Amino acid sequence: MPPPTTPPATLRDSLWDTSRWLPTTRDELIARGWDEVDVILVTGDAYVDHPSFGASVVGRIIEREGLRVAILPQPNWRDDLRDFKKLGRPRLFFGVTAGCMDSMVNRYTAGRRLRSDDAYTPDGAPGFRPDYAVTTYTRILKELYPDVPVMIGGIEASLRRVSHFDYWSDTIRPTVLAESGADLLVYGMGELPLVELLRLLGRGVPFASLKTIAQTAVLLPEGVPLPKNANWEDFTLHSHEECLRDRTLYAANFRDIETESNRVKARRLLQPVGGGMLVVNPPYPTMTEAQIDGSFGLPFTRLPHPRYRKRGPIPAYEMIKHSINMHRGCFGGCSFCTISAHQGKFVASRSKASILEEVEAVKAMPDFHGTITDLGGPSANMYRMKGKEQWICDECIRPSCMWPQMCANLDTDHTALLDVYKAVRETPGVKHAFVTSGLRYDLFLHAKKSSEVARSHERYMDELVAHHVSGRLKVAPEHTSDAVLKVMRKPSFGLFREFKQRFEAAKKKAGNVQLQLIPYFISAHPGSRPEDMADLAVQTKELGFKLEQVQDFTPTPMTVATEIYATGVHPYDGKPVPVARTREEKEAQRSFFFWYKPELRETVRAALKQFGLERFIKPLLSEGGRLAAPPSGAGGVVRTTDAAGYARNGPELKPVPANRRGQAQAPAAAPGKGGQIKPASLLSPGLRVAVGRGQSTQPRVGSESSPGSGKKRGHGPHGGRW
């Protein structure tokens, strides 16, 4: 007799009826009576009809617009290319995405070794997507169907839209439009440009004429004039060839790109590439509540396509199938993170009604047993947060609203978020509603706030711990060194110490002393030296932690930290920043995390001696050891002991206006030593470096943290939307 949770046969048959999904095969097209489709979407992920998977969202939007759309998931690129031919030629265009992750992050470990699994493939099987998937798929389509337009999007295309440093080839690569041959690139979360594109095509506008849609990019051949748009101001970046010759110009490009991405009204970016011109149109305004509700309200089955039923579970889907994403965007501006470059700095929040509708959809799933695994977002507690005065935000180009101190104009009231939490946990049939997305504790520990906002902060901590922690609360202080945290754009470690005290008090108040606090840390981040990592190990040991959730830094396109890694200087002031490049130094920095493992004790001891850090041996490897003051001239680490942290130091910062040229008012970049980037020699082969965080808006998937942890802090399932 089947277990009670197994649906009846009739329900199972209805549940897995392929007509509920977008078609993926010729037989499914025939079953619908279609002899042709308007759009074919090619994706590097398995097809999961869920709002966390970008190709599904794009497909459902195209369907909503009254067009015929099919999905081609994980086509075989190594045989006779029959997969690319089986659905035929689309009437309008092909859409191509690598999937929810950059394909190189997905396929390779930190040491540039092939991964043994793929969280976006049934049974976690590797080998179902190519390197540089956007480029590979697009080139094949252009070879087979040279007259059919190709639109590219998703996280891989979005973050490679301009000249960028590619860690896996050790080169500065041009826009992916140049490498792939695609006709149009949609960057960011692309529902709005997609709808405009579809409606223009519906009015008979040729695809080749679609050069002025916001949030898209095109590569104009030599001699083709720039398309006119009276509403946009232009800003010209240094050419790709100049970036190859001079690292200071490459760094300056990133500074200008990030500055424009932080504007409410950005300028159109132009970059000469070869003999052509890359044109990156400004983004759409932040989605309204109605617009984002519309995306999440599409008729998803919330299930993998039936074709995978005998191939095993899809790990990424298993992680997020009972979770709910409440908002998009992040104003944290962390140096290693791609969220603001892809989802935007300004937060787009769903309505309470939309969230509760999704709760009902989750409850209706056959394997739901009462637990919402995450009520989250890119940062869990930014729901409905924005500037108090919009005109101030309109003038501001700060990359972060939280660093180096909390913006005086930022409204950090948690009341709306608490209201949603309460409504979800009180929904009949919901036993638990946990928060497992990353938490920004500095949003409720900063000093400058009204009494009403302060009360919401106290309530948030108490209610979070009492009702929404599954056993472990995960936060990301990232480091203990103030110097490294400054490079990361993160608050002082002293603030984490204060948060730990608040957490301990809150769990006692809730009567649940078994709850654990799990901090995340990064090793080998630009600015981090061996002595910084050794001090991190000592400080966290003194706090009672044996670290598990850790990672090495991996350069991923379009982050401040990646530009520092590629050039050796900070793009905002041109000053040199220490960077761990050798395999030995990276492995040594990582080993300090695991001082408590018996098999690594001698490795840690040898590393400390190698770097002249013998004074750390006793406090780190001996019970009850304490760190002595560094000897004079030893370059010792300044310890952070002030629990008040950066939020208590100095006056509160205001939004940063632009100068007349429209740039942040910062010192010009200093000339680099030698003045050139030599991409092939920047990195040592075989480095053990892991994913820099990107679109991790739900529980993280993969395996690049601690041994056996099964988590990858990086591109997550919500990051790949067009």
Image: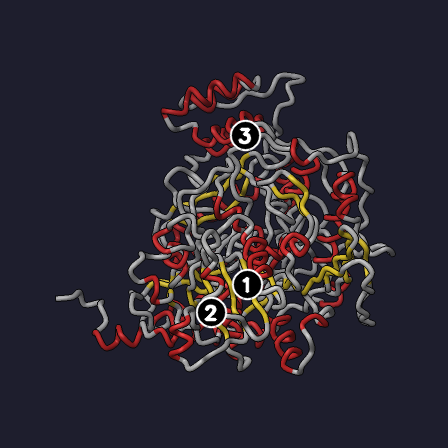
Quarter of the figure that contains the C terminus: bottom right
Q: Residue furthest left?
A: 1
SS at mark 3 in the image: helix
The residue singled out by tag 2 in the image is: 87
Q: Which of the pair 642/323 is nearer the observer? A: 323
**Residue at screen point 56% across, 31% down:** 685
Residue 276 visible from this viewpoint: yes
CB under 8 Å between discs 3 and 1? no
Judge depth for marks 3 and 1 and give the one in front.
Answer: 1
Vertical placement of residue 657 versus 370, above or below: above
Residue 666: x and y in percent read 80, 46
**Residue at screen point 76% across, 52% down:** 273
Residue 7: x and y in percent read 23, 71
The residue singled out by tag 1 in the image is: 721
Relative placement, left or right, of 666 versus 478 is right
Q: CA distance from mark 2 to mark 1?
A: 23 Å
Quarter of the figure that contains the N terminus: bottom left
Q: Which of the pair 412/148 is nearer the observer? A: 148
